[in-house]
Amino acid sequence: MGFSLLPISVILIFALYYLKFTSSGLYTRVRQGFIFSLVTNAILVFAYNELFSPFNALNTTTAVIFWFVENVSLLALLFYWHKTGQVQIPELGTLKKVIGLAGLTKINKVIIILALLIYILPLLFLAIYPPPNNFDSHSYHLNRILYWVNDGNLDHFPSVHLQQLYLNVFAEYLALDTVLLSGSDRFSGIIQFGAFLGSLAGISLLAKRFGLKQNGQLLAAVFLLTLPISIFESTSTQVDYCACFFFISYVYFGFELLERKSLLTLTAFVLCLSFGGFSKYTIFIFGLSFTTYFAFRILFKYRIGYALKVLAFAVIILVATFAPFFRRNYLLFGHVMRPLRGTVFASEELPVDKYGLRYTLSGVIKNAGLNLGLPDTRYNQFVEGRIRDFHHAIGVDIDDLGLRLDRFSVKYSVHEDMVPNTIHFWLILASTLFLFFVPGKWEFKWLWICAVLGFVLFSTLMKFQSWSTRTQMPFFTMGSILVTYIYDQKLRWKSIYIIAPLLVLSTPFVYGNPSKELFSINYFTRKMLAHIPIAICETGGAQAELYEKELGAYYEFPGNQQCHPIRKWPGYNERRKVFALLEKVGYYDLDRSSSILTMDRGKAYFLSHPSNYDNFKPLLDHIEGDHKNVGVFFEKGNGFYHYWSAMAAKLDHPGKMQYIRFRKEFMRLENARKEFCYDYILSDDPTLLANFVPKANIDTIYTTQLFQLVKLKSKSCEKSLY
């Protein structure tokens, strides 16, 4: 199986590092070797993708050949080092001690085994078995991979959803190779899961770096393991955990470099910052304060000569990493990073439009507010009210369009993109207050000062978005070190007293992720709490009429944009009545039957947007035959990965999907000029479609509430430019 070449590569690289560097303790060598193996594999992925892309040779054949040759080369190097006495292969037998958890206390062994059985193995299953169904992944993360595979290169392509082009791409580079080697998206989630494991190793090593012993290192790892957004991201096909892993590794290698000069450490240090920022630009924001700190420390400790060498090396690595991608951006947008305002490609603006102390305070409070929600609407409304009062007091409009993309609210949403980290956040706040009373320990304090400055800088520069709890992950990773340091080193309480509650309280997130639920935990939890929606959103039709008939006494009909808000928040007994009515009209039907174990794979792709499946499935039944291409004629800026995946799940030999309507400015791209002939057209705007397809070439038109599928009499290769 082609995909096996990737984990084999990681294993071989790990073996080389483990055998070569024997000065550290057993568990430290294992963790360091794993991190180095992930970073080295990332270098190889980058090299393959960028070297083969100019030749339009990104395909399964070249991927298999590249990774096979790479593995043979690693194996040959391993035996060469063994023959020349540089390593002793039998030394790998010491890994049995790690498997047996030798040297750990009995309670820590129990904790690790429970974490493995209850958390890590189920999350590994969820990273592989369910289809990737994250909404952003369908919109651009995986959609761009689909284009890269079809085109055989990483070049920009015509699109109506520009985020598919210019937003950070390195995590998708990694996922691309899993798709090429396996021939499907089955293992695309393994990238974030691998980053999750690497982050646990990195954060425990960082804890060790600050003097924390066995108990403290385990507590730091458990804090990150049980972070709700960490659990959800570990099985997602987004990019946040990948970026977070490189951030943690960057900080760890930075402190290691301050301990002793090492070319290997320096290389890993710079590469992790580069790859982290290439995965998500916000890593540069969270990393800026750390970069400044490391720069001054390197300058004062190693003097200007070495500092200049580090700077030059960093510039070279950053240029080598970003130059090919920036070139692709510049050729299309005229700007290396993104489309500019006022141009035909202008897209969403993520940086804020206003700067000042009060706007920074607003951003910090709102981003903190994302982690204050509880499954209690009255509590959430109270907290939101106080935050709004604070904004009124400082003279800032809380929903100023210059400061936000989403309206602010305090809520408890068990959603893969925006679940709050409430318990962990309060632990971090309490530990921050305690740190003020700790004398000395300035190296550790600077760690936390840099983390806080990163959070403040992020809140200052970026517009507020309701899904930013995952973007804040670098802050929470450093928070795990803070909480552990205070709890273990200063309070000196037994770690089990905090580890056990964290493991218990976060377990539902493992099994109850709405996007890949193993059991109907969300439904039963809501029923127990009588947790009803504050608004019912419905696209219309008979179901909307039923909602209005049964629930009109509790919800306002009609509402804005087909969302009907609750009239007044009722007490518990009244909410139970409302919950029963919602059950009666089928509002919770999907929640009650949402186990990923029994769900059809085609349907499972749509768990983040089930109404799209209801409208697309009838059309799917009319797409027949092998290698039948579908032209996508969308007016709205949406991705189509889930539609193609549902088609691929139904057909043995599905064709391609591509946008056939896009701006004429895309025609400067070679990929836009390539011929694409299609048998069907999928459209979300029948009016536009009617002016594009000649009636003489229309076989049949199938219509649902959201889409039209046009079956053509003969293949068409025309494109609509606007």
Image (cartoon, rainbow, N blue to C red):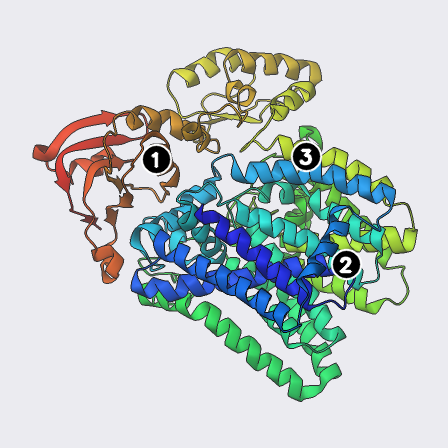
Residue 460 seen anywhere in this rendered image of the structure? no
Q: Which of the labelled discs sits on residue 620, or is there none?
A: none
The mark closer to the camera, 1 or 3, is 1
Residue at point 38%, 61% (across, down): 339
In this picture, residue 2 sits left or right of residue 420:
left
Q: What element does badge 2 sit on?
A: helix
Give x and y (percent) for residue 657.
29, 42
Q: Which residue is mark 1?
A: 648
The mark closer to the camera, 3 or 2, is 2
Residue at point 35%, 62% (across, down): 53
Residue at point 83%, 42% (across, down): 498
> In 3D space, how far apart are the residues under numbered discs 1 and 3 (Cα atoms)?
42 Å
> In 3D space, how far apart are the residues under numbered discs 2 and 1 (Cα atoms)?
46 Å
Residue 334 position (above or below residue 654): below
Q: Give the camera-side residue of 152 and 683.
A: 152
Lower position in the chain sequence, tag 3 or tag 2: 2
Q: Residue furthest bottom?
A: 305
Give x and y (percent) for residue 323.
42, 71
Q: Give the camera-side residue of 325 and 609.
A: 325
User: What number of labels is visible?
Assistant: 3
Q: Which residue is mark 3?
A: 380
> In 3D space, how far apart are the residues under numbered discs 3 and 2 (Cα atoms)?
47 Å
Quadrant for residue 618, please give it: top left
Q: Which of the labelled discs sits on residue 26, or is there none?
A: 2
Residue 588 position (above or below residue 144): above
Lower position in the chain sequence, tag 1 or tag 3: 3
Task: Identify which amino acid the numbered label 2 is placed on.
Answer: Leu
Q: Residues within 10 Å of mark 3 (few under 14, many from 20)?
A: some
Task: Identify which amino acid the numbered label 3 is placed on.
Answer: Asn
Lower position in the chain sequence, tag 2 or tag 1: 2
Task: Identify which amino acid the numbered label 1 is placed on.
Answer: Ala
The mark closer to the camera, 2 or 1, is 2
